[in-house]
Image (tube, rainbow, N blue to C red):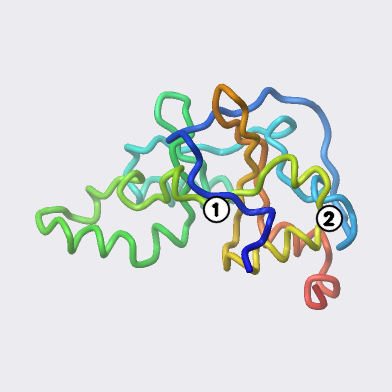
Amino acid sequence: MRNAMLTRGQNSYSAVLPRRAIGSGNRIQLYDPAINAMNDFTREYPVTVDEDRQIGAALNDMVRLGVRSFLVVNELQVVGFITSYDIEGERPIQYIQQFHDVRRNEVQVAHVMTRWHDLETLSWPAVKTARVADVLQALRDTNLMHLLVVDAESNGSIVRGLFSRARIERQLGVMAAKTG
C-alpha cells in the first residue's frame, strides 16, 4: 500500500524556491507537527548546485558545507536532487560504462542526479497536518534519507522544504530515534 503523503511525477520538469520567513526549532518528539522537523526553505536557504558542476567538486562542496545533498538547479529552476550516495555510489560507474569515452572527472551532476520528475516528494498540504512519525514512516516506505516537500500551484511547483532522516533522528535524540 502506497503512503498517501508521497507524490511522484510532477507535471513539470522543475520547481522554484519560496520566499524566506524567520525562525527554526531544535528538539522534537514523534507526535510533534512534521513542520517542526522540516528544513523550511522559507526560513533557511537551501544549498544548491548547478547541474553542470563536476561530481567531485560537488562532493567537495557537500563536505565543506556539512551537508549530504543538494537541490540541483539550472538557471534558478530546481531540476533535480543529488546526494553524496549518488556521487559515491554506482551511478557514476554506470554512466561511465554507458558512455565509454567519459572519464570520472568529466561526469557532471546532471548525469547522476535524480531528475525532478522522478523524485518521490511529500505534498505541502499533507505535511501541514502530518506528525514527525508520519514523515519517518514515509522515509522508511521509500527507503530514502531525504524527501522534498512540494507545494503544487497552478503556475508550477514550489519546493517548500526538505526532510532529512539523519536530522530528524538527531532532533529526536538517540533513544527516540531507536524506538521510532
**In x, y percent, where is residue 136?**
73, 63
Choose between 129 and 168: the one closer to the eye: 129
Residue at screen point 68% across, 51% down: 163
**Callout 1 environment at 10 Å: few (<14), some (14 to 19), or many (20+)?**
many
Picture disc at residue 120: 1
Q: Secondary structure at mark 1?
A: loop
Picture disc at residue 144: none
Residue at screen point 59% across, 50% down: 7
**Callout 2 environment at 10 Å: few (<14), some (14 to 19), or many (20+)?**
some
**Dividing the image into 4 quarters, which one contains the N terminus?**
bottom right
**In x, y percent, where is residue 32?**
89, 54
Residue 100 vertical placement versus 127 (above, below): below
Choose between 144 and 169: the one closer to the eye: 144
Q: Amino acid at mark 2?
A: Arg
3D distance between C-alphas at marks 2 and 1: 19 Å
Name the residue carrying label 2. Answer: 131
Q: Earlier in the sequence, mark 2 or mark 1?
A: 1
Q: Quadrant of residue 179?
A: bottom right
Q: Amino acid at mark 1?
A: Glu
Q: Quadrant of residue 158?
A: top right
Residue at screen point 81% across, 28% down: 22
